Structure formats: structure tokens, C-alpha cells
């Protein structure tokens, strides 16, 4: 749409083993029984989608206390958000020219702790928080029982929030902004197809952590994959949307890809 923009917000860096992100990346073999492991740097990002109707925040990043005991120690050891304390949601929005009060709605791609850590800023407000029904169910199941995934923290999302539930495969949020269900990494990952004057944008999010997941169709590592079958089907959905629209595809944590888009689209 003519006036829609997508501005990218850099929320810092996570250091993690590539084996978590690309399945089989450092697997041993008969000829190489002790392969080297590769630590890599990944980006945490949010986006502000400005439409004629509303200013929408995509995800909320990590809690700034991630490295101070807020994140469980095993998770921080595996995925160290090394500069989370330097990246509060309020400060990073301010650096991009926005304030928390400018945000009319929030879309949660999913509720893992590196995406939902700033939701508390919208507690006790009427700001709508869009989340897929399967994600909200799985997040509470995981955070409130010993089942599910350890990557959900109840303290991130168990607040008085104005949840708006997304059902099914797609949801039109605004003219030119359509949410797309992409299960695989988690049951309720949301991506988006956004039309801007600079061209279309496809947010694949954590369906694809990095380019290798997308281009080479290598799944995420087992610890990051809820369902490989669902992941593959979602990947084909994103690729078909790219073929239909010629959109730029934005991955979940690929630092080089993130930087290649500069400040964003029509920003």
C-alpha cells in the first residue's frame, strides 16, 4: 500500500553454535570423527510497520535482564544474548523515532523468550496483541507444566494483555498486511506478507533462522524444531509467496540478511 513502511529495529546479538541452526552442521563422520564446532553471531530484531490505519510492532525482543539470571542458565549458555542489557525496547524504539505510546498493535511471531521479552511493556493497556491460537496454547502448556519447550517463560507473557487470537492459515491485519501461519519451529509461528512502495516484504521469521534454512532447505537443528514435516510445508508456502510476489524475504536471525535491507522498506 502507498503509505505503508517497514522499519527494522536492531535489538542486539545472540552467540550460538551453528549446529543449533543448521541441522547436521557439525555432525561427526567416519572420516571426521571430531569436527570443529562453529560459534556464530545472530541478530535479534523487531520491526515497526506503519500503515495509514495503525503503527504495528512486530515482536518485542529479549528481556534486558536475559544475561542477569532472567533467562534459565542452560538457555543463556546455548543462546547468549550478550548485549540484551543495552537493548531495551523503549530505547531501541526511541532510536528509530518511535515511542511505546506510538504503538497501536503488536504482532507476536511466536512467544519464545527472545521475541516476547518486551511484552510486559503492554501489560494493563488496551493495545491489541496478535498471536496465533496454537502458539498461545503451546506457550502456556510449556511454561506452566514440565512438558513442551523450555524456551517459553511465563514471566514474559503471563500478564494482563489484550490478546487478539489469530485462527487458521492467514489473517488480514490491514489492507496490504496479511499474517500467515508458518508452523514448524513452534506450532504457531506467524509470518507476514506486506506491500510497500519499495516492493513486497515477506517476513519468514524463525521459520528460517538463516539463509541456509531457506535456500538449501536444511531444517533447523532438532532443539529448535517442533515439527520437521510442518516446517517443510511452511517453507514451501513462503517460497510460493515469494514466487507470486517477488518479495524480499526476511529471516529470523540472519545478521547479514538483516543488514542487507538497511533501515527497511519505504522507511
Image (spheres, rainbow, N blue to C red):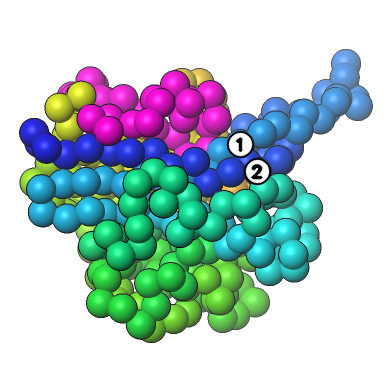
Residue at disc 2, secondary structure: strand
Give the x, y percent position of residue 61: 50, 54
Residue 42 disc label:
1
In-front residue for pair 184/155: 155
Q: What residue is shown at x 17% (from left), y 34% (from top)?
A: 195
In the picture, which quadrant includes the C terminus? top left
Mark 1 vs mark 2, CA separation in Å: 5 Å
Is the Cβ of the residue at disc 1 closer than 8 Å to that at disc 2?
A: yes
In the picture, which quadrant includes the N terminus? top left
Give the x, y percent position of residue 188: 38, 58
Give the x, y percent position of residue 223: 65, 50
The reply to whether residue 248 is in sight is: yes
In-front residue for pair 228/53: 53
Mark 1 closeness class: few <14, some 14–19, many ≥20 residues within 10 Å: many
160 vs 18: above or below: below
Q: What residue is shown at x 63% (from left), y 41% (from top)?
A: 13
**Residue that mark 2 sits on:** 14
20 vs 121: above or below: above
**Horizontal side of residue 170 vs 24, given as left or right:** left
In the current view of this chain or complex, which residue is farthest to the top? 31
Mark 2 closeness class: few <14, some 14–19, many ≥20 residues within 10 Å: many
Q: What residue is shown at x 73% (from left), y 37% (from top)?
A: 17
Give the x, y percent position of residue 113: 56, 61
| Among the two numbered marks 1 and 2 on one chain, the one whose residue lies closer to the N terminus | 2
Residue 170 part of the magenta segment: no
Magenta residues (range): 238-267
Q: What residue is shown at x 78% (from left), y 53% (from top)?
A: 77
* Residue 232 picture quarter: top left
In the current view of this chain or complex, which residue is farthest to the right? 34
Amino acid at each position: 500500500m502507498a503509505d505503508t513502511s517497514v522499519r527494522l529495529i536492531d535489538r542486539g546479538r545472540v552467540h550460538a553454535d551453528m549446529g543449533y541452526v543448521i541441522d547436521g552442521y557439525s555432525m561427526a563422520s567416519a572420516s571426521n570423527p571430531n569436527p570443529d564446532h562453529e560459534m556464530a553471531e545472530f541478530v535479534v530484531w523487531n520491526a515497526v510497520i506503519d500503515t495509514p490505519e495503525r503503527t504495528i510492532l512486530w515482536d518485542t525482543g529479549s528481556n534486558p535482564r536475559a544475561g542477569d539470571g532472567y533467562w534459565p542458565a542452560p538457555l543463556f549458555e546455548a543462546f547468549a544474548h550478550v548485549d540484551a542489557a543495552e537493548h531495551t525496547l523503549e530505547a531501541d524504539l526511541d532510536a528509530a523515532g518511535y515511542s511505546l505510546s506510538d504503538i497501536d498493535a503488536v504482532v507476536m511471531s511466536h512467544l519464545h523468550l527472545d521475541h516476547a521479552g518486551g511484552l510486559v511493556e503492554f501489560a494493563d493497556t488496551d493495545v491489541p496483541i496478535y498471536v496465533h491460537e496454537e502458539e498461545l496454547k503451546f506457550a502456556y502448556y510449556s511454561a506452566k507444566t514440565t512438558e513442551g519447550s523450555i524456551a517459553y517463560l511465563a514471566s514474559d507473557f503471563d500478564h494482563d494483555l489484550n490478546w487478539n487470537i489469530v485462527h487458521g492459515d492467514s489473517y488480514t491485519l490491514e489492507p496490504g498486511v496479511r499474517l500467515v501461519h508458518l508452523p514448524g519451529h513452534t506450532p504457531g509461528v506467524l509470518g507476514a506478507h506486506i506491500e510497500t512502495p519499495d516492493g513486497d516484504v515477506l517476513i519468514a521469521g524463525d521459520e528460517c533462522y538463516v539463509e541456509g534454512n531457506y535456500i538449501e532447505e536444511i531444517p533447523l537443528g532438532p532443539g529448535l524444531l517442533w515439527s520437521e514435516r510442518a516446517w517443510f510445508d511452511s517453507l514451501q508456502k513462503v517460497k510460493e509467496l515469494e514466487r507470486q510476489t517477488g518479495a524480499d524475504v526476511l529471516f529470523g536471525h540472519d545478521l547479514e540478511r538483516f543488514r542487507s535491507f538497511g533501515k527497511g522498506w519505504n522507511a
